[in-house]
Image (cartoon, rainbow, N blue to C red):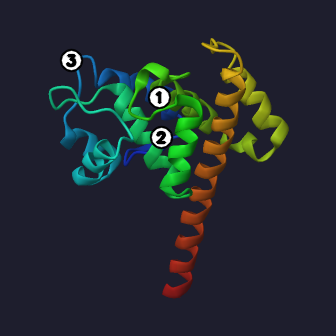
């Protein structure tokens, strides 16, 4: 099955999903990436990304280079924006990370959050069943170390919302394709 890596414009098969984390990390071996690369990966216009920085949704790039952490924040927001309003996304991110433009108060790194989400998304067939979803969440959160009491529960709630929003966006896209096909016949 072929689909886009969540939050990106990169087409991958379900088999390639297990290697997505390694491939994204490899892009940063030489340091950060520039705005045009972030734009190519996400499918977002450069002005949108710059606007998100100005609005405090993520920290400013250092020497015009974005870190993996910043890219993952952008991917998290981009993935959610088709199902949630920007105000809701900011509230969700603030729930686990306090001030969005201050990384020092985060209870989970955006990179870790995104890669946890990817691991969940690879099990998307089990996600329609709440018990299956909860089993997957527990497995994925098994190695998470709480920086403060209650952090695991917060991260789990956010991952559940992210998964639900992503699935809703997937269903919406499917419905739109079906309507388009209907019009063509």
Q: Cα distance, mark 2 to mark 1?
A: 8 Å
Q: Nearer the viewer, mark 3 or mark 2?
A: 2
Q: Residue 122's quadrant in the figure?
A: top right
Say whether disc 2 or disc 1 marks the residue closer to the N-terminus. 2
Residue drawn at the location 43% of the way across and 48% of the way down: 78
Residue drawn at the location 55% of the way across and 34% of the way down: 118
Looking at the image, do the residues carrying marks 2 and 1 touch, with CB atoms under 8 Å apart? yes
Q: Cα distance, mark 3 to mark 1?
A: 20 Å
In the image shown, does 152 or 75 lie closer to the viewer?
152
Give the residue at mark 1. Answer: 110
Q: Position of residue 50 (x, y in %)?
A: 25, 46
Q: Is residue 30 above or below residue 113?
A: above
Q: Nearer the viewer, mark 3 or mark 1?
A: 1
Q: Secondary structure at mark 2?
A: helix
Residue drawn at the location 23% of the way across and 25% of the way down: 32
Give the residue at mark 3. Answer: 30
Give the residue at mark 2. Answer: 76
Query: How many numbered marks have been drawn onto this rendered protein structure?
Result: 3
What is the crowding at mark 1: few (fewer than 14 residues within 10 Å), some, or many (at least 20)? Answer: many
Looking at the image, do the residues carrying marks 3 and 1 touch, with CB atoms under 8 Å apart? no
What is the crowding at mark 3: few (fewer than 14 residues within 10 Å), some, or many (at least 20)? Answer: few
Whether residue 5 can be seen here:
no
């Amino acid at each position: 099955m072929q689909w886009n890596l969540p939050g990106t414009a990169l087409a991958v098969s379900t088999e390639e999903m297990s290697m997505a984390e390694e491939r994204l990390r490899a892009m940063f071996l030489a340091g950060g990436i520039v705005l045009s690369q972030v734009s190519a990966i996400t499918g977002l216009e450069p002005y949108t990304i710059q606007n998100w920085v100005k609005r405090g949704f993520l920290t400013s790039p250092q020497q015009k280079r974005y870190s993996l952490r910043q890219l993952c924040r952008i991917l998290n927001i981009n993935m959610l924006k088709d199902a949630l309003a920007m105000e809701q996304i900011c509230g969700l991110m603030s729930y686990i990370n306090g001030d969005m433009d201050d990384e020092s108060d985060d209870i989970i790194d955006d990179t870790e959050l995104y890669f946890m989400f990817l691991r969940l998304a690879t099990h998307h067939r089990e996600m329609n069943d709440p018990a299956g979803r909860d089993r997957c969440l527990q497995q994925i959160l098994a190695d998470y170390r709480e920086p403060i009491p209650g952090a695991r529960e917060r991260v789990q709630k956010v991952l559940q919302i992210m998964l639900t929003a992503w699935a809703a966006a997937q269903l919406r896209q499917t419905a739109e394709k079906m309507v388009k096909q209907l019009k063509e016949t």
